[in-house]
Amino acid sequence: MRVKRNNIVAVRVFTGRDLIEKLYSEGWEVEQREYGLLSGVKKLSKGAINAISDLGDNLIVKPISRSKMGKKIIDKTQDSIEDSLDKRIKLDREIKELDKSIKDLSLSNEDSAKSIKNNLKNEAAKNKAYILEDKSNTSGKSFENGTIDIRNPEIKKAVRKKLKFDGRKDMEHFNNSNDLILFKESSGNPALAHEIGHVINRNSKGKAAKIDREAENIIEEFHKPADSPGGRDNSKGLWKSVERFFKGKKVVNNEKNASENAIKLLKESGASENELKLAKESLDKSLESYKEEHKMYYKSPFINKLQSFRKNKEK
């Protein structure tokens, strides 16, 4: 899950997004990992890729844009993007309703919910993750749940200066951690389990770890169309759309893997069948929301390029 830019106040003095922005302002690069776009073009220079992209746009996109079919494709693609926006709004409402049900269930059995949360925290510690928790329960001053890689010693040192610890043991726990989990308490145990699920992916060996590394490198770009007016950012090009289709799949798969880990963790932590059912419904709908974002992510460059060619024709 992403870490969103908000004006936020957290429990340990410094907040998630403020923390990231402060590190960037001081010259640190957070979550900057090597990422290969497509295996077949890793060795191509940026200039060569741009040349191929321009050639494809001129040979394929330009003729389509100026045909009668071009207008229909533009309208159909825009309708599809708007449909994805509407679906995400609907999914968001449904997720909030499910999260409310999860919270009500936790309040009806606080001891069980607390026990599950403690077990999850222990699992996070086993996976060398430090949890920065916001207990304010306010919607205006908060952060979205997410994770930050703090393996780089210099980044960890910079982060440590911004936090206020609950004693020496708490500081030692941070010093021994590789990841920082941002967790808003009001989001519930399923959300915490999901973020721990991301850490488990990152620490694993093989495909899940590779997908996590690649997904984290593009997550900010992935969310841009959904955060932009009309569900589209300013990217253009057929090649860009193809590239984004495959890159975006990695983000969706990474979320899927984290949610599968979350259900397993909740079950091992003592969650009841009803709690597991609600958690799975909420996480599944969150995954559906990511799938709709994926559609906007890869369709934006294509429709933008079509429209730019068509506008030039009409001038």
Image (tube, grey):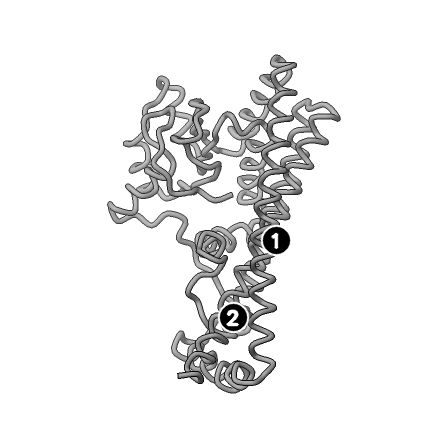
Residue 281 seen by the camera: yes
Q: Position of residue 258 (x, y in %)?
A: 60, 42
Count the labels in the image.
2
Residue depicted at 72% across the width and 23% down the height: 272
Question: Which residue carries the number 1 mark?
Answer: 291
Q: Earlier in the sequence, mark 2 or mark 1?
A: 1
Q: Nearer the viewer, residue 42 or 310?
A: 310
Q: Is residue 183 left or right of residue 277?
A: left
Q: Label 2 neighbourhood size at 10 Å, few (<14), some (14-19), many (20+)? A: many
Residue depicted at 56% across the width and 27% down the height: 188
- Taking the view exactly as shown, the residue that stands out farthest to the front is 314
- Taking the view exactly as shown, the residue that stands out farthest to the right is 273
Residue 303 shows which numbered tag? 2
Q: Label 1 neighbourhood size at 10 Å, few (<14), some (14-19), many (20+)? A: some
Give, as a three-letter code, the residue at label 1: Lys
Q: Position of residue 286 (x, y in %)?
A: 60, 43
